Image (cartoon, rainbow, N blue to C red):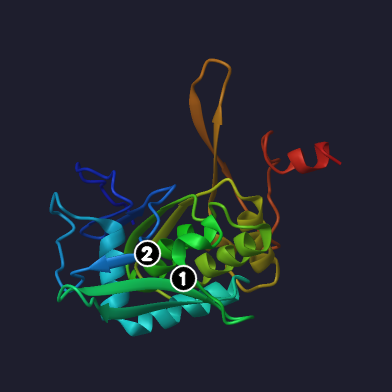
């Protein structure tokens, strides 16, 4: 399906327009606390704040907290995402605190006190859960995650595509771990190879970019040689 990208400001962390949702790279971290989460702001408004919108979703939908927590554990990030609301003593204001609980030792941590990658992947997971159709654009979804978590994220991307109809996902990534997991799923017969398209953006000496398609066969292998600067870099360091 071809989607026409509308002309609008796509600079926010999470933008949506009709059937297109865009999650940018280097996403703004969720704050420790919020107030007034019952007041929703339309995504088309100039006052729209994507991190606040996510906090509002977490506040109003407890199942979202549970689902994100489940996906974090699947990625090897053993935290539960939780929210607690309290009324301040001095003023009649409700404070909504977002925190992560370490499932191994029970320690409660502010969302800004854990590894940066955890906070970066939460908006990605939220959109994977919420988006049921259309086009989802993800910039560097693996940002600041360790290799195992990156590979498991690749698993979640594949599952999201297979679980929905009329849904297309485009992920811009620098992670060979994500790509290797997709190839493994094809090799194991768990992901049809025709659902995966690998596009490599190359730049020549004149600074001109070109897009090279690298097909994957039914055995989960590239049918053409991979261009320089990616997989072989690991071998060059050995």
**The quarter of the displayed image where residue 33 is located:** bottom left
Residue sitting at the far front? 90
Please indicate whether residue 194 sits to the left or right of residue 136 in the image: right
Q: What element does badge 1 sit on? A: helix
171 on left or right of 193: left
Disc on res. 32: 2
Query: Is 66 above or below relative to 10?
Result: below
The residue at 24%/55% (across/down) is 49
Foreground of the two, 11 or 107: 107
Give x and y (percent) for residue 98: 38, 71
Q: Is residue 210 left or right of residue 19?
A: right
Residue 87's x, y, as percent?
23, 79
User: Is residue 7 depicted above or below 190 in this figure?
Assistant: above
- Give residue 156's position: percent from left, percent from top: 53, 69
Q: Nearer the viewer, mark 1 or mark 2?
A: 2
Say which quadrant the N terminus sits in.
bottom left
Q: Check disc 2 and report its element: helix, strand or loop.
A: loop
Q: Residue at left 58%, top 68%?
A: 155
Q: Quadrant of residue 225?
A: top right
Residue position marked by numbered label 1 in the rendering: 160
Residue positioned most to the top:
206
180 on left or right of 63: right
Q: Horizontal and vertical percent for residue 11?
A: 29, 43
Name the residue nearer the viewer: 181 or 102. 102
């Amino acid at each position: 399906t071809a989607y026409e990208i509308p002309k609008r400001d796509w600079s926010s962390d999470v933008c949506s327009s009709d059937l297109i949702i865009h999650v940018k790279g280097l996403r703004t971290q969720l704050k420790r606390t919020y107030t007034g989460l019952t007041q929703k702001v339309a995504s088309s408004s100039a006052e729209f704040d994507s991190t606040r919108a996510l906090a509002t979703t977490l506040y109003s939908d407890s199942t979202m907290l549970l689902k994100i927590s489940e996906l974090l554990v699947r990625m090897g990030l053993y935290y539960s995402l939780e929210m607690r609301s309290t009324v301040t003593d001095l003023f009649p204001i409700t404070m909504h605190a977002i925190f992560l609980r370490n499932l191994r030792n029970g320690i409660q941590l502010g969302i800004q006190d854990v590894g940066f990658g955890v906070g970066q992947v939460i908006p990605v997971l939220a959109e994977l859960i919420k988006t049921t159709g259309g086009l989802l654009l993800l910039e560097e979804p693996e940002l600041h995650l360790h290799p195992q978590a990156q590979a498991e994220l690749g698993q979640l991307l594949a599952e999201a595509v297979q679980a929905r109809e009329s849904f297309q996902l485009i992920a811009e990534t620098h992670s060979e771990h994500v790509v290797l997991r997709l190839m493994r799923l094809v090799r194991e017969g768990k992901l049809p190879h025709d659902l995966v398209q690998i596009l490599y953006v190359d730049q020549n000496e004149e600074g001109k970019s070109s897009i090279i398609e690298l097909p994957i066969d039914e055995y989960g292998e590239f049918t053409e040689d991979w261009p320089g600067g990616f997989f072989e870099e690991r071998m060059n360091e050995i």
